[in-house]
Image: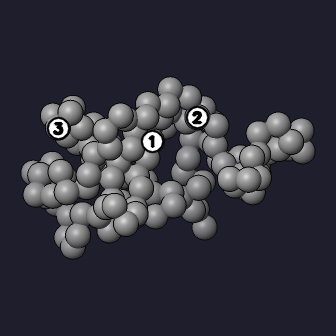
Amino acid sequence: METNLDLLAKDDHAVFYLIGKGGSRFLGTCILESGYTKLNEEQSKKLVHTEYIDSDQGVFVKNVEKWDKPLPIECLRGKPSLAHRGGTIGAHFQGAIKKIERKDYYAILHEHELVF
């Protein structure tokens, strides 16, 4: 059975989404430099920062763009480009790894440009 991790591929575009007490928000974007991978012992020694995370699995990224001002999820509520959703819009984006449609990705970027 294919998982969301199996769907990750080199050159995919990603958006960072954070759920927290201060509200849910998009924090920036990146491009995947690799698909999902498990680090070998040498890579793990160099790259894993156990004080923050203890996983030796993940993806390599490039072109990381951390937005100075995060985009609150509320900015996307009621937008025609995302109107096809049932339920709450925040629930659609929740999950450790979630594949979203290309049009949703670009709607997030467009809204960020409009707001900031």
What label sits on residue 14 in the rendered view? 1
Q: What whole-number distance in Å separates the C-alpha atoms at marks 3 and 1?
A: 20 Å
Q: What whole-number distance in Å separates the C-alpha atoms at marks 2 and 1?
A: 9 Å
Rendered-image quadrant of the N terminus: bottom right
Few, some or many residues within 10 Å of mark 3 (<14, 14–19, 20+): few
Query: Badge 2 is on which residue?
Result: 61
Query: Horizontally, is 24 left or right of 40 in the view?
Result: left
- Horizontal and vertical percent position of residue 62: 56, 29
Residue 28 lies in what quarter of the image? top left
- Horizontal and vertical percent position of residue 102: 32, 42
Q: Going by the picture, which residue comes out furthest to the bottom?
A: 87
Residue at image position (34%, 61%) is 22
- Of residue 67 and residue 98, the one placed in the foreground of this image is 67
Label 3, secondary structure: give it. Answer: helix
What type is the residue that disc 3 sits on? Val
Residue at image position (31%, 61%) is 23
- Of residue 56 and residue 49, the one placed in the foreground of this image is 49
Question: Which numbered disc flags the more N-terminal residue, 3 or 2?
Answer: 2
Residue at image position (11%, 52%) is 79
Q: Are marks 2 and 1 in contact (CB under 8 Å)?
A: yes
Whether residue 95 is visible here, answered yes or no, is yes
Few, some or many residues within 10 Å of mark 1 (<14, 14–19, 20+): some
Question: Which numbered disc flags the more N-terminal residue, 2 or 1?
Answer: 1
Few, some or many residues within 10 Å of mark 2 (<14, 14–19, 20+): some
What type is the residue that disc 1 sits on? Ala
